[in-house]
Image (cartoon, rainbow, N blue to C red):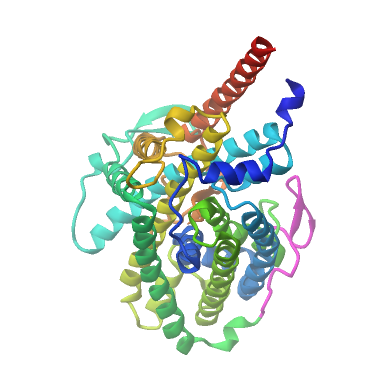
Amino acid sequence: MASSLFARKPVSLLLKEMGGRAGLRPVLGAIQLTSLGIGAIIGAGIFVVIGLVAKDKAGAATMLSFVIAGCACAFAALCYAEFAAMVPVAGSAYTYAYATLGELLAWIIGWDLLLEYGVGAASVAHGWSHYFTEFLRLLGIGFPHALADAPFDFNPATGQFVSTGAIIDLPVLLIAGLITTVLVIGIRESATFNAFMVAVKLAIVFLIIAVGVFYIDPKNWHPFAPYGYSGVSFFGTTILGQHGAGGEPLGVLAGAAIVFFAYIGFDSVSTHAEEARNPSRDVPIGIIGSLSLCTVLYIAVATVLTGMVPYDKINIDAPLSAAFNEVGLPWAHFLISVGALTGITSVLMVLMLSQPRIMLAMARDGLLPAGFFASVHPRFRTPWKATILTGTVVGLMGALSLRGRTHHAPAPSRGRAPVSLSAGSLRADPRHRSLSSADVLAAGGKLAALGHLVATRLRRLFRLRQTS
């Protein structure tokens, strides 16, 4: 039994299973895969996190923070690209681990991916609701509070659960239902919908850069790195560079550690390798292309923002909106709201698109019930049962989850936001963390997964003894 837990799966067997009954439809090209990568990487964070890092961590040198984080991600992207070209099968890091490290480590990585995509999607869906209701307010349309928030919250100051006065977060259910429907219909339709969202947000980002560049004052870039070029901490203690009042590291490297999360999402492209027409060529192009383009855009937006406003005067609540307001361009507020809403929509879609592919790969290997999770629709050629389950869990979890970790969506006109949205999940400031249903789901999911793995191993061992 112990040896079977570390048994590796031959690449030839992975490729054989890919073309079997549970195979997906290979219709994606390099452009669609690149679009999926951009859709997962660029969320609302590009409109928020840049200002936060520029003011509190790196100043105008934030652009260097993005360069450093982008270089670090590039090495990971090259690894993903090589693996995806060699093993063009759904499953991403789970499948690569099974082929190289064995079943036990693949199982651990697989469940990590499921929790990452599932919990991240629920958090993003909850944040989407707040962006949506905020956008409606900009249009003069009110949305009842009773249908726009979680029904209860956890107050870390008192250690008690409190009522929010709401019944359910209805927008979460609506967006989860809409995206689930699109995902079930087909991968081609899903990619087209994502491409539309990506086109809108890229157009807005390019417009912001093109207009903002005419209002850059080079004097605002001095001093270029007010907090220095370092900023390294070890177990909460700053060992290199300056530190803030709370002991947190400051500097370019500290900023790179934060903006790194703005890149998460390019790996989702590898989950769709099985649906690529020419995976050996198109998947590496999609991974590296999306990461490269997003790096350039992040650096460009950081350059424009820090050039328009001195770093110490950046409004971290709504950095870009405030910067454009100062130069007499108030229309940017509405435009940025549209960009943030479309950005977070595409992030949510890619997360919900990727998770069922991980489930499909694990079900093929017997680590999840194959009758349900490996079921591919005969017409749409999508893992429809796993997709519907994902949409249901994401919708309910986002609509009913405790607000402690997910309700601080950084809408342009809200107060200071302790999270930045990108790449599929909300990254919360540790000072604002509290109990969340995401924590309960994560713990329960891992225990259930461990039980299923042990039961599966025991069943296989029992069958081998019977046959012998």
The magenta segment is 223-243
Q: Nearer the viewer, residue 195 or 134?
A: 195
Point out the residue furthest to the right here: 239
Quarter location, residue 227: bottom right
- Answer whether residue 1 is visible to the viewer in this image: yes
State whether residue 100 is above or below residue 62: above
Q: Residue at x 44, y 55 (%)?
A: 347
Give the x, y percent position of residue 123: 44, 44
In which quadrant of the rendered image does the N terminus lie?
Answer: top right
Q: Nearer the viewer, residue 205 or 321?
A: 205
Point out the residue furthest to the top here: 466
Q: Main secondary structure of the magenta part?
A: loop
- Answer whether residue 412 is visible to the viewer in this image: no
Give the x, y percent position of residue 283: 56, 61
Q: Residue at x 24, y 58 (%)?
A: 136
Q: Nearer the viewer, residue 401 or 468?
A: 468
Q: Residue at x 62, y 59 (%)?
A: 260
Magenta-span inclusion, residue 242 = yes
Point out the residue furthest to the left here: 141
